[in-house]
Image (cartoon, rainbow, N blue to C red):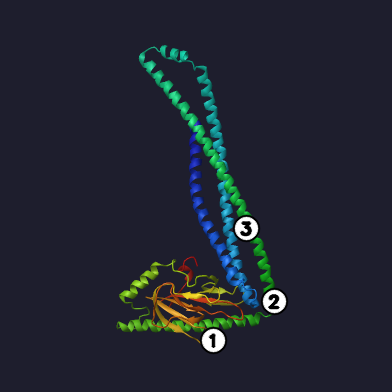
Amino acid sequence: MRRSAFFLLLFWIGLGTGFAQQSSKQQKQLEAQRLQLKNEIKQINSLLFSNTKTRKNALSEAEDLQVKLNVRSKLIKVTNQQANLLTRRIRLNERTIADQRKELESLKAEYAKMIQKSYASKSLQNRLMFLFSSENFLQAYKRIQYLKQYARYRRKQGIAIAEKTTLLQELNKTLTQEKATKLALVEENRAVQEELEKERKQQQNLIKTLKRKERSLAAQIAKKQKQRKAIDREINRLIREAIAASNKAVGKKGNKTFQLTPEAKLIAANFQANKGRLPWPLEKGVVIQGFGRQQHPVVKTTTIQSNGVVLATEASAQVRAVFEGEVMSVIVIKGSNPSVLIRHGNFITLYTNLAKLYVKKGEKVAAKQPIGEVFTNQQTGETQLQFGIFNNVKALNPKDWVYQM
């Protein structure tokens, strides 16, 4: 029964250790996410809500609030996951502490019995009588070995009690720390939820005022989409022309992908190898519109299409090339601000809504080299860059390519 209990205890300790290691790894990952989201909220406040003098229109303000609401919701979710994980760890630690206490009490009881037995036969005379009463030399030798083993076992039991006591102290210390961490997370989450509710009410009030002019807002969004489609068509045309030129140079026709020189192949391979690790095209920025087909965050009856992402940044922010390459084209379309296309083998990066240009067509650029300055709308105070990545003519999601976007 005692051996079964011992092995069961070992099983629980092993299970607890495995869970502790796994949950510690998860906790670190969640903590990194939590800090990243908190930093993102700080950047959103700095880039979208710091300039109260510049009056945004109600639609832009509601859109910006939606960006913040999304990030706050993610933060609450991550913090809840951390708190739940800590709850499971606390329960397991409490169970382990209870088991360890039982084991310690058992060790102490056994040790007490040994001490009592030793005290009863502690005199040298008793030990000598125990040895001299042996029937033969072999029995005397075995009795000497028994006395030695008994002494060693006593020392071992004493050490085990000391180790078990230390382990319990450490477990109690860990438990106290975990409870304090959980309490801090719960308190932080409560504050974040309160902020979320305030911002949600603020957005709902804005949406109520916008409801009365929903048609004009839909027309306003449609106008923006029309401008974006015009840029997308021009980008598509320019990429196809560049593909055709690369095919013509090697005597091929009808191929829909770039024919690459050895140098271009190396650049393309390096670009591909850096997927998920490319630098941001801005030193400071937050994603305010994602990639692909999506419902408008405020006017729910309207759908928008984006072949890249829209990044909000600070006024006079410089745009950087995310990788080495060659300026393929500088686009200027009526009613829109300039765009720059940079080719990296069979990959192309797009930077739209620039106020100033630092590069021209055919120029070689290095990674993180400034290529222009983002345009700031003086009426709304918005400074936004549209950023895209293409593989031949196929639009890719920049979030998959840029580090922690």
Neighbour tally class for label 1: few under 14, some 14-19, many 20 plus, Cα within 10 Å: few
What is the x, y in percent for residue 21?
48, 48
Neighbour tally class for label 2: few under 14, some 14-19, many 20 plus, Cα within 10 Å: few
- Residue tagged by mark 2? 209
In depth, the one of 79 and 230 nearer the eye is 79
- Residue tagged by mark 3? 189
Q: Residue at x 42, y 78 (%)?
A: 342
Q: CA distance from mark 1 to mark 2?
A: 28 Å
Quarter of the image for residue 196 reads bottom right
- Residue tagged by mark 1? 335
Residue 271 drawn above or below residue 126: below
Q: Look at label 2 and name its amino acid.
A: Thr
Callout 2 secondary element: helix
Q: Look at label 3 and name its amino acid.
A: Asn
Callout 3 secondary element: helix
What is the x, y in percent for residue 353?
51, 80
The mark nearer the N terminus, 1 or 2, is 2
Quarter of the image for residue 345 reads bottom left
Q: CA distance from mark 2 to mark 3?
A: 30 Å
In depth, the one of 7 and 13 nearer the eye is 13
Q: Is residue 176 visible?
A: yes
Say whether marks 1 and 3 touch (CB < 8 Å): no
What is the x, y in percent for residue 209?
69, 76
In depth, the one of 68 and 17 nearer the eye is 68
Residue 83 drawn above or below residue 8: below
